[in-house]
Image (tube, rainbow, N blue to C red):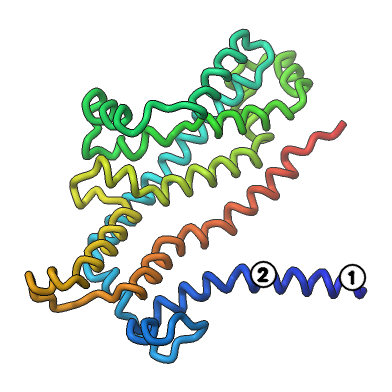
Amino acid sequence: MAFMIIAYGTVAFLTILCLLPFWLIISGSFTSENEIIGEGFKLWPNDLSIDAYKAVFNNPEQIFRAYWVTICLTVIGTCAGLFLTSMAGYVLARKDFKYRNTVAFFMYFTTLFSGGLIPWYILIVKYLDWKDSYLAMLIPALISAWNIILMKNFMKSIPDSIVESARIDGANDFTIYSRLILPLSTPGLATIGLFLALGYWNDWFTANIFITTESKFPLQFFLYKILANAAVLRTDIAANLAAVNFKAPAETLKMAVAVVVTGPIVLLYPFVQKYFVKGLTIGAVKG
């Protein structure tokens, strides 16, 4: 009994410590700029203000469009990336694939060396002609060598007897992959799917390089532009060049942007977590 009290107390204490930074972000986003500058961040603000959210949603049509672009890229990229990654992992996990070690070596080689940013930019813009295209944000992040290696190692843990029994029943390779391997690989798929979804959701650098049309901005890059514009508006030069009717706050704006960006993905995680548990039970093999 004493051990359970100590264990639950320790877990509760650590949980509170983990939640404190998130609460500070939410609290800071509703704090007035003057209070943060004068007194710093607090767990509960004395002067509540929604000026930061007014700045973020100053043009609601643009931010909802940015949300839609990011959601579409995340959903399409995650589903397509999982399909391609799982197929590649399944092929490399097959012991009867003659060149699997050679292919795996070349894939692993790309994790150690890369062509760099300039050759990548030339490939995307000059040869693929994906400048200012959604494909520049979607295609390059579909497949990662690390994800394929991770999926291959997970699929190797599936007993060969399952594949052999399916072959005896007359199943072809794609049937074995789709009806047996994928259901048994749910924990691996959920893990890699979460990696892919977070990668697409948090990507702003690709849009910064390749996207020039404002209507195609994803959420992260759009909010980055808002922060950059707010920083410019605070300078004396910008104040002398133009009259600004609404001066966006700086510190609280950062907190509000963090809430807007992380809110949906944090709410999504509990729904993804159940697939981890479900996958563990589906993937259990009885001897």
Image coordinates of residue 185 in percent, x first then y, are: 65, 35
| Screen quadrant of the C terminus | top right
Q: Residue at x 26, y 61 (%)?
A: 228
Q: Residue at x 62, y 15 (%)?
A: 101
Q: In which quarter of the image is residue 73?
A: top left
Query: Residue flagged by tag 1: what amino acid is it?
Result: Phe
Image coordinates of residue 219 in percent, x first then y, are: 33, 55
| Screen quadrant of the N terminus | bottom right
Vertical comparison of 186 with 204: above or below: above
Report the number of discs: 2
Residue, disc 1: 3
Q: Is mark 2 on a helix, strand or loop?
A: helix
Q: Is mark 1 on a helix, strand or loop?
A: helix
User: Residue lying furthest front in this view?
Assistant: 236
Q: Is residue 49 left or right of residue 245?
A: right
Q: Which mark is residue 117?
A: none
Q: Is residue 212 left or right of residue 285?
A: left
Residue, disc 2: 15
Q: In this view, does 227 lie to the left or right of 167?
A: left
**Foreground pick, 166 / 15:** 15
Q: How crowded is mark 1: few (under 14 residues within 10 Å), some or many (20 or more)?
A: few
Q: In which quarter of the image is residue 182?
A: top right
Query: Residue flagged by tag 2: what amino acid is it?
Result: Thr
Q: In which quarter of the image is residue 13?
A: bottom right
Image coordinates of residue 50 in percent, x first then y, are: 33, 81
Q: Which of marks 2 and 1 is nearer the N terminus?
A: 1
